[in-house]
Amino acid sequence: QVQLVESGGGLVRPGGSLRLSCAASGASEFTLTYGKIAWFRQAPGKESAGVLCISNSDGSTYYTDSVKGRFTISRDNAKNTGYLQMNSLKPEDTAVYYCAMGSLLSPPGEYDYWGQGVQVTVSS
């Protein structure tokens, strides 16, 4: 069974940076090389804001406007691990961040595996 383990969250001051990691384990039936990875977030007391960014197996990426130019999604296929580099963080970026991965066969917008979530708090 594939599990996604997230790490890298924490408390950071406005303007600071954090890098989140999302590692797939038990992945004998899944390889990120042919799959996609996405990051989502859910702020306190709010519903999920939808996908923040996506990295597809063909190298293409997508960013929602609120993080474009500040966040960078990347991957290390050999390690079955994805990353989210977050720069110029703002208090409104405070949320629980979730990663998700999907195989080549998963439909657009759908994902097979989800991480447990990691807290990011931006505060002075």
Image (spheres, rainbow, N blue to C red):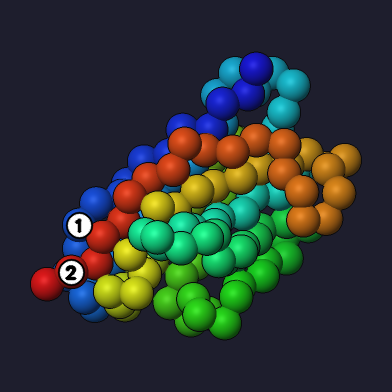
Residue labelled with disc 2: 123
Quick one: label 1, few (<14), some, or many (20+) residues within 10 Å? some
The alpha-carbon separation of the residues under discs 1 and 2 comes to: 7 Å
Residue 82 lies, with reference to residue 40, above or below; the image says above
Q: Secondary structure at mark 2?
A: loop
Q: Quadrant of the N terminus?
A: top right
Quarter of the image where the C terminus is located: bottom left
> Where does residue 37 sit, x and y in percent of width and height?
64, 50
User: Is the residue 78 above or below the residue 53 in the image?
Assistant: above
Kindly indicate whether the residue at mark 2 contacts the one at mark 1 (C-beta within 8 angstroms). Answer: yes
- Image coordinates for residue 24, horizontal then vertical, percent: 56, 31
In the picture shown, does residue 59 fall above or below 89? Answer: above
**Which amino acid, mark 2?**
Ser
Residue at 77 percent across and 49 percent down: it is 110
Sequence-earlier tag: 1 or 2: 1
Residue 95, horizontal then vertical, whole percent = 37, 59
Q: Amino acid at mark 1?
A: Leu
Residue at figure coordinates x 48%, y 58% from the top left: 41
Q: Residue at x 67, y 67 (%)?
A: 61
Closest to the observer: 22 or 108? Answer: 108
Front-lying residue, 120 or 42: 42
In this orientation, does residue 27 appear? yes
Q: Residue at x 50, y 48 (%)?
A: 98
Residue of label 1: 11
Apparent side of residue 30 relative to residue 13 in the rendered image (left or right): right
Q: How many marks?
A: 2
